[in-house]
């Protein structure tokens, strides 16, 4: 462009996926102990070719009751998927634990 002007294309805003289902995953005998409990998050994508996500950021919130403090503590861990598959396995969960899941689309 002219002096003092620059062209810059902003990254496109990714879609906002919806979690439609969370299900238990049955592992082969002997493999479950190392991985803890496993669930699969199923997403519905609301995308067009212009805003389709390249991958997803998954936030796992584990709500733990602290009997000493008589309150709840939330532990958080995040991970990104390698691609944009609409079924995402989540490993290393504690049996009987209370979990909340959040998913966001990621581009760039």
Image: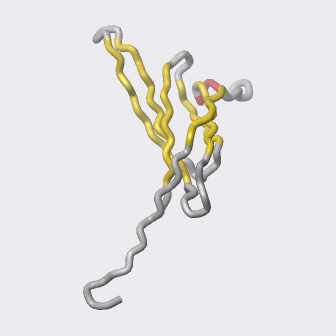
Looking at the picture, the colour scheme in use is secondary structure
Q: Is residue 85 above or below residue 9?
A: above
Give the percent coordinates (x, y) of residue 22: 61, 30
| Relative to 80, residue 59 above or below | above
* Residue 5: x %, y % from top left: 30, 84
Residue at horizontal 57%, vertical 52%? 82
Front residue (pair 50, 38): 50
Residue 44 % position (x, y): 62, 43
- The residue lying toward the viewer, choosing from 59 and 79, is 59
The outermost residue toward the bottom is 2
Which residue is nearer to you in this view: 33 or 65?
65
Where 106 falls versus 34 (above or below)? below
Horizontal arrangement in the rendering, residue 91 relative to residue 3 (left or right) = right
Which quadrant is home to the N terminus?
bottom left
* Picture residue at 74% right of the left edge, 28% below the top: 28
Is 75 situated left or right of 25 in this image? left
């Amino acid at each position: 462009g002219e002096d003092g002007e620059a062209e810059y294309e902003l990254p496109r805003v990714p879609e906002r996926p919806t979690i439609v289902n969370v299900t238990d995953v049955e592992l082969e005998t002997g493999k479950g102990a190392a991985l803890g409990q496993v669930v699969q998050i199923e997403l519905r994508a609301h995308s067009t070719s212009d805003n389709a996500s390249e991958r997803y950021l998954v936030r796992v919130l584990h709500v733990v009751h602290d009997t000493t403090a008589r309150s709840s503590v939330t532990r958080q861990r995040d991970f990104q998927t390698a691609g944009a598959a609409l079924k995402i396995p989540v490993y290393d969960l504690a049996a009987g634990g209370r979990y909340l899941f959040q998913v966001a689309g990621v581009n760039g």
